[in-house]
Structure formats: structure tokens, C-alpha cells
Amino acid sequence: MSHTTTVTVLGAGALGAAMATRLGETGHEVRLWNRTGEKAREVPS
């Protein structure tokens, strides 16, 4: 049985981007929100 956790990160600053990247690398489904969509799109998924 495979279980994937969906995590939402609010803010794509230095800390939020690093957290979102690491969570994605460890197999979580990540949803990232930022005031400016451009910055959120720059974070690797």
C-alpha cells in the first residue's frame, strides 16, 4: 500500500522554497502558494 501526503507551503521565499523542494524530493505531493505566481513557478517540483 502506497500513501502520499499532500503538503501545502505558503510562501516561496528562501525557507518556503527550500522546504517545498525537499518535501517533493522525499515523495510528498507539494502545493506551493506565493503572492506572486512567478516566484512560485521558479521552485523546482
Image (cartoon, rainbow, N blue to C red):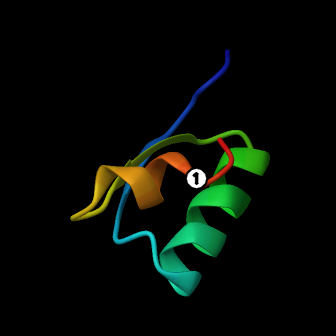
Residue occupying image coordinates x 56% and y 31%:
4
The quarter of the displayed image where residue 9 is located: bottom left
Give whichever of 5, 9 is nearer the camera: 9
Judge by depth and name the residue closer to the eye, 33 or 9: 33
Taking the view exactly as shown, the residue that stands out farthest to the right is 25
Categorize mark 1 by other alpha carbons within 10 Å: few (<14), some (14-19), many (20+). Answer: few
The quarter of the picture where the C terminus appears is top right
What kind of element bears circle 1? loop
Q: Is residue 26 visible?
A: no
Is 17 positioned to the left or the right of 13 in the image? right
Q: Position of residue 44 (x, y in %)?
A: 68, 48
Q: Position of residue 37 (x, y in %)?
A: 32, 50
The quadrant in which residue 21 appears is bottom right
Foreground pick, 11 / 28: 11
Q: What is the residue that sits farthest to the top in this orientation?
A: 1
Total labels drawn = 1
| Quarter of the rendering occupied by the N terminus | top right
Q: Is residue 2 left or right of residue 33?
A: right
Left or right of residue 20, residue 18 in this image: right
Which residue is label 1 attached to?
A: 42
The residue positioned 49% from the left and 46% from the top of the image is: 41
Which residue occupies the extreme left position in the image? 35
Q: Give amino acid for label 1.
A: Glu
